[in-house]
Every structure is written in C-alpha cells, then in structure tokens.
Image: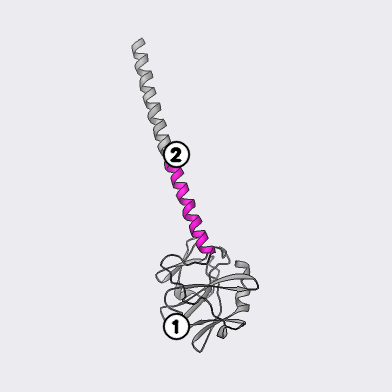
Amino acid sequence: MKGRSNVVFRENSINDRSNRNYLLVFGVILLVGVGLYFVGFGASSQQASSGQPSAGVQDAAASTLSAQGQASDVVRIPLSQVSDKVSFLSEVVGGKTIKFMVVKGSDGKVRTAFDGCEVCGGSLGYRQDGSDVICNKCGKTFRIDDLGSGNGGRGCFPANLPHIIEGQDVVIKKSDLSGKAYLF
C-alpha cells in the first residue's frame, strides 16, 4: 500500500511539472504576441500621425503648392502629379495640419477626400490597396471610384473634399480644408 501511494504521488508530481512548463511556454508566447502587437500598432500610429504614407503608397513629388509659391486661399496640385496611386497630402490651415488625399479613378477623373472620417476620426486615416482605400482604424474598404460621392449614411467613409480642375491644376479651397479641421 505504501509503494502504491508513492507511485501515485510521483505521477502527480510529473503532471504538475508538465503543466507548469506548458503554462510557462504559453505565458512567454502571450507576452511576445502582445509586445509585437503594440510595437506594430505604435509604428502604424506614428506613421499615420506623421502624415507618411503606408508602404507601397506613392506620395506626391511636391506635397501641396500654393499659386506660384505665394500665399493663397487655395491649394494647387499639378495634374501631372496625380495618378492611380493615392497621394496623401497635408496643408496647415489656421495652425492645424489637415490631411487629405488625391487620386485618379479608373475613369481618369480626379478624386479628392479627407484622409479622415467623421465616424472613425482623422488620426489614423486610410491606406491604399490596389483600387481601394482601407480605413486604418476599422478596416472598412472603399473603392477609389466612390471617393467624393459622399457618405450616404453608411458609417465609416473618407470625408468628402470638394475640388475643381483649373488649367493643369487640381484646386482645393483652404476654407473647405478648414471646414473639417475637427477631424484632425
């Protein structure tokens, strides 16, 4: 009887050590995973807040240009710099940096929108994936060809930014930019 009791004790002891090892391995994996998540999140937040485009996204060669370099109430972007790759731009208006995007749709028409949403906010913005833009906060996907069409009450959507084509430039009023400053 005494020997049997001892054997059972040793089996339980081995199972306890094995369980502790599994818990230790699980804990280490969990800590590494959480650490990697926050490192990745921090990098994407810094990237978005710094106005830098995500990997694979082309930024405009010259960010935003005022008329002949003079103070102006409009932002001019040369049409020659607008392509099917989203250009993520920013302009300081009233002391606040306003982020927006400009791109040519599949029909060749220029699309402009704020790099922010009235539902998700402007701090994280969007990124391009082929012919779509994706919200960096909620992950919702939008066709580039739908930019500028207005939200229509569907939740997250890049806020509309009016523009006109004047000569060889896309022209955006600074007053339109400042109208959505609260997003940023």
Q: Looking at the image, is 123 positioned above or below residue 101? A: above
**Left or right: where does residue 175 sit relative to residue 52?**
right
**Left or right: where does residue 18 sit relative to residue 122?**
left
In the rendered image, residue 52, in percent from the top left (x then y), is placed at 49, 66
Query: Hey, which residue is sitting farthest front in the picture?
Result: 69
**Left or right: where does residue 3 sit relative to residue 136?**
left
Q: Regarding mark 1 in the picture, which secondary structure is present there?
A: helix
Q: What residue is shown with label 2?
A: 27
In the rendered image, residue 21, in percent from the top left (x then y), is placed at 39, 32
Of pointers 2 and 1, the one earlier in the residue sequence: 2
User: Is residue 137 visible in this depiction of the protein?
Assistant: no
The CA span between labels 2 and 1 is: 54 Å
Question: Mark 2 is on which residue type?
Answer: Gly
Q: What residue is shown with label 1?
A: 80
Nearer the observer: mark 2 or 1; the answer is 1
Give the camera-side residue of 173 and 144: 173
| Badge 2 density bin: few <14, some 14–19, many ≥20, Cα 10 Å | few
Magenta segment includes 46: yes
Residue at the image point whose x is 42% and y is 31% from the top: 20
Residue at the image point whose x is 61% and y is 77% from the top: 176
Give the camera-side residue of 67 and 125: 67
Q: Main secondary structure of the magenta part?
A: helix
The magenta span reads 26-50
User: Is residue 40 visible in this depiction of the protein?
Assistant: yes
